Amino acid sequence: MNPFELLAEYFSYPFVCYALIVGVVTSLCASLFGVTLVLKRMSFIGDGLSHVAFGALAIASVLNLTQNLLIVLPVTVICAVLLLRVGQNTKIKGDAAIAMLSVGALAFGYLLLNIFSGSANLSGDVCSTLFGSASVLTLGRNQVVLCAVLSLAVLVVFVLCYNRLFAVTFDEDFARAGGVNTAAYNMLIAVIIAVVIVLAMNLVGSLLISALVIFPAISAMRLFGSFRAVTVCSAVISVFCAASGFVISMLAATPVGATIVAVNCVVFALCSVAGKIRRS
């Protein structure tokens, strides 16, 4: 069977189409706000919140909750708000607060799974949660609808708040002087990134989520210099990497999350070379 026939057979199953939809819309949302995070030097917050999401997922697993989103999403959003507040504390700087919270959440999550989990394959479950698993192929229709609704809300917020996000990204003092509530918009950015991270956990796992936020943005920055061009290019790169990584993982029987991140790495290398050629 040639690759095209194999793909046609795969996509004849609804759950494969559901997984592709979730992967594309999640990657798109991550890339849009990833540009802002990279420019504001807050990209490490994605890695910190992904570890928090792992800890929350461990709690949901211990409580045997079928709808783990009911715990994971609120806990991750609350921690995003706390990170922003603590990061403004002169005694604990932002990077130190992120490091403390991420390592603490990862450790407590693993401890909870070791002490209370009744799974016979604990190491496999932890590895799947950290690096992604085939669970993205088991998403039901309701989960896909919820993911699509949350992603649409993120896109609407980005479009409606584009000008203010642009101002807050490049010059908070000037934006504040112009009447923009910079604290509120920073809070909005943190909350939305928390939502995107929770949505992406099934796709790439908690350790690889930050790649969806960072790689498309820095790849686009190698090619363009304006905020709008970088944002559009980042979105295109992210969708392309998510879709192509998903297809490659099916054809090569490789993990979905790791394959998508690997494609992002290759695209970044190509964009770096193209950027140097263009400048020369």
Image: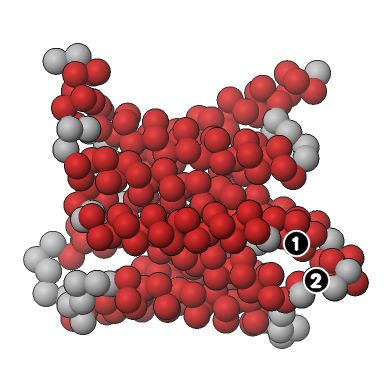
Q: Amino acid at mark 2?
A: Val
User: Which numbered disc flags the more N-terminal residue, 2 or 1?
Assistant: 1
Residue at left offset 65%, top offset 59%: 160
Q: Nearer the viewer, residue 248 or 157?
A: 157
> Which quarter shows the N terminus?
top left
Quick one: SS at disc 2? loop
Q: Estimate the x, y position of residue 33 in percent, counting from the top left.
A: 60, 55
Asked whether residue 201 is in view, the answer is no
- Relative to 40, say whether 259 is above or below: above
Residue at left offset 73%, top offset 24%: 276
For label 2, count other residues whose C-alpha is less than 10 Å away and answer few (under 14), some (14-19) or many (20+): some
Circle 2 residue: 180
Q: Nearer the viewer, residue 183 or 263?
A: 183
- Relative to 87, say whether 121 is above or below: above
Separation of disc 2 and disc 1 at Cα? 7 Å
- Relative to 216, say whether 182 is above or below: below
Asked whether residue 147 is in view, the answer is yes
Circle 1 residue: 164
Q: Estimate the x, y position of residue 11 in percent, counting from the top left.
A: 22, 32
> Which quarter shows the C terminus?
top right
Q: Are marks 2 and 1 in contact (CB under 8 Å)?
A: yes
